[in-house]
Image (cartoon, rainbow, N blue to C red):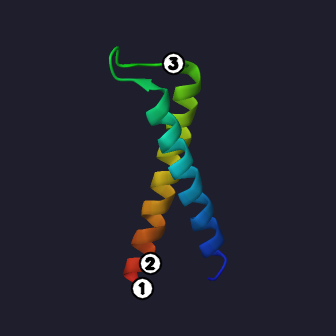
Amino acid sequence: MENKKPITFIFWVITIILGVTLYKQFDFETFKFEKPALAVLYIIVFVFSVIVLIKNFKKRSEK
């Protein structure tokens, strides 16, 4: 069960980096991304990492 901690840390890092990157690429005046295709990829990976973190948190709280 100790193998879950490094994986959780990696997903936290991925989530933070992608969140900051998405925020920086978004233009709030025109409500568009600078690079839309890359933003879609970032959003998909960001959502996946958040889902993994939520599932891991729920499993921990059940124990």
Write down the residue under mark 2: 60
Q: Residues within 10 Å of mark 2 (few under 14, many from 20)?
A: few
Q: Secondary structure at mark 1?
A: loop
Q: Residue at x 53, y 27 (%)?
A: 39
Mark 3 or mark 2, which is nearer to you? 3
Q: Which mark is residue 2?
A: none
Mark 1 residue type: Lys
Q: Residues within 10 Å of mark 1 (few under 14, many from 20)?
A: few
| Gap in angstroms between the C-alphas marked 2 and 1 | 6 Å
Residue 62 picture location, percent across and down: 38, 80
Residue 59 picture location, percent across and down: 44, 74
Write down the residue under mark 3: 34
Q: Secondary structure at mark 2?
A: helix
Q: Residue at x 52, y 47 (%)?
A: 48
Mark 3 or mark 1, which is nearer to you? 3
Q: Check the image and report above or below for 46 versus 33.
A: below
Mark 3 residue type: Glu
Residue 20 picture location, percent across and down: 49, 42
